[in-house]
Amino acid sequence: MTPQEHAVQKLAQAVEGLAEPYRGNTVQWLETCMQRPVDSLEEDLRVFLDDLHPVVRDSFLQYTHLLLTDALRYFGRDERRPVTVRTVRPTLAQILSS
């Protein structure tokens, strides 16, 4: 399995791991990115990524992976997992200490 095929498989699994309606929203977002309807998630992602320039493809994979990782943390199907809130912006104490 090539690295790109592995990435496609991971993205498809991440999308499938989301609970509804978040899964449907993610598929709609991917359809907007791909500018075509999604019939088979893995196959359509593979075709879409093959059409992209390598730099754009790497950037898309990187940021989509980050987005789906956070989405799975908050909206994944397993409700028993603890949710940890991660802040992107520094806190006031962090700003004052630097």
Image: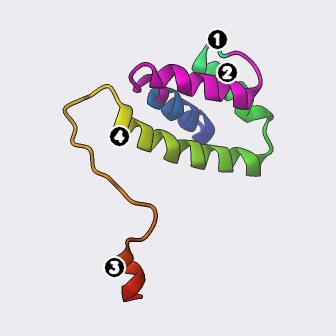
CB-based contact (under 8 Å), mark 4 and mark 2: no
State the CA–CA distance, disc 1 to disc 4. Answer: 26 Å
Q: Which mark is residue 73?
A: 4
Q: Which mark is residue 44?
A: 2
Going from N to C along the chain, the mark reached first, 1 or 3, is: 1
Q: Which mark is residue 94?
A: none
**Badge 4 density bin: few <14, some 14–19, many ≥20, Cα 10 Å:** some
Give SS at disc 3: helix
Q: Determine which residue is flagged by label 3.
A: 93
Q: Determine which residue is flagged by label 1.
A: 39
CB-based contact (under 8 Å), mark 1 and mark 2: yes
Q: Position of residue 33 (x, y in %)?
A: 71, 32
State the CA–CA distance, disc 1 to disc 3. Answer: 49 Å
Which of the 4 quarters of the picture holds residue 16?
A: top left
At x 52%, y 27%, the residue is 12
Which of the 4 quarters of the picture holds residue 90?
A: bottom left
In this rendering, would 98 be left or right of 81?
Answer: right
Report the front residue among 20 and 72: 20
Q: Which amino acid does label 3 sit on?
A: Ala
In the figure, 85 relative to 77: above or below?
below
State the CA–CA distance, disc 4 to disc 3. Answer: 26 Å
Q: What stretch is highlighted in magenta?
A: 15-37
Q: What residue type is labelled 1?
A: Asp
Give SS at disc 2: helix
Q: Position of residue 59 (x, y in %)?
A: 67, 50
Going from N to C along the chain, the mark reached first, 3 or 2, is: 2
Give SS at disc 4: helix
Q: How is the rendered protein coloured?
A: rainbow
